[in-house]
Amino acid sequence: MDARVSGDASRSSSADVRRVSIGSYNIHKCVGLDRRRSPSRIAQVLKELDCDIYALQEVDNQEGEEEDSMQLEYLSRVLEMAAVPGLRIVRHSGQYGNALLTRLPIASVHRHDLSYWRFEPRGALDVQLDLGDHKLRVIATHLGLSRVERRSQWRYLLKAVAAAPAEMPTVVLGDMNEWFRFSATLRDAHRILGEPLAPVAFPSFAPFLALTRIWVRPVGAMASIEVHRTPLSRRASDHLPVKAVIDVEKFGGRLVPG
């Protein structure tokens, strides 16, 4: 397991898990619509969401004078979850990056560098979590703003997905920055991962774009997917969080790769 994981990754038992909840949330550096920076408010939204796993985007993890300046460490501590920092946070190559929080035991961590030409550096976390009879592979990312950039990044990630056995339970999620529903990027993803519902979650005050996506393979394992709309979540960030519930019993036979 990668050493750069904070929190107690072994706190949860590896006994068989039947349902797993996973959320994706662009926290916008914890700056809300009122332009106030409040990690405690984001923590409260995550508590409302009540997931086993969170994929977070735009996490500001720079040292500062305030106790909550290191946002990933703060959220990990307040939520009592293990934190897995993305590539930019590990290398300190930018002001913010993506990260994962989890209550489940972590089996392995891999970081993909998705940076493209002169655009803003991007990356993806590729984490295996222990569910007892299964390993769950979670790939969390935040893709670029340019279409050509996203196309390159998606090709890379879909090759990474295809490198594992097709029966490997896999979740791919994050802020995909893809607003055109008929894009080649989404068509490629749907062909390999299926086409789940994609509820609109941006902007938080009046959502009409589905930038945040969650795919689950096998497709039938996704029990539900919904946007978390509360008075607090509408103010805490410019994105609303999206939550999916996964039925582990739909994964099929025992699959615990070595």
Image: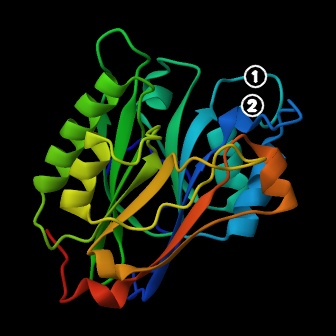
Q: Position of residue 52 (x, y in %)?
A: 55, 70
* 102, 26: nearer the viewer: 26
Relative to 122, residue 116 above or below: above
Would you say the residues marked 1 and 2 are in contact, meaning their CB atoms lie under 8 Å apart? yes
Q: Quadrant of residue 86?
A: top left
Rendering coords of residue 153 (x, y %): 28, 33
Left or right: 218, with 172 as reference point: left
Left or right, 197 with respect to 171, comes to right
Q: Amino acid at mark 2?
A: Ser
**Could you say whether the residue bearing mark 1 is in a helix, strand or loop?**
loop
Q: Position of residue 195 (x, y in %)?
A: 32, 65
Q: Quadrant of the C terminus?
A: bottom left
> What residue is drawn where x is 42% and y is 54%?
173
- Report the residue at 21% width, 88% height from top: 252
> Can residue 175 be seen by looking at this rendering?
yes
> Among all residues in the image, which is located at the extreme front?
182
Q: Earlier in the sequence, mark 1 or mark 2?
A: 1
Residue, disc 2: 69
**Residue lying farthest top?**
118
Label 2: few (<14), some or many (≥20) within 10 Å? some
- In the image, residue 190 sits, relative to residue 206, either above or below, namely below
Real-space CA distance between mark 1 and mark 2, rounded to the nearest whole angstrom: 5 Å
Judging by the rendered image, the residue that carries numbered circle 1 is 64
Question: For the residue carrying disc 1, how many other residues have a C-alpha within 10 Å: few (<14), some (14-19), or many (20+)?
Answer: few
Expressed as whole percent of the image width and height from the top left, the position of residue 26 reads 60, 43
Residue at image point 43% right, 23% down: 91
Residue 49 position (above or below residue 60): below
Of the residues shown, which amino acid type is indicated by label 1?
Gly
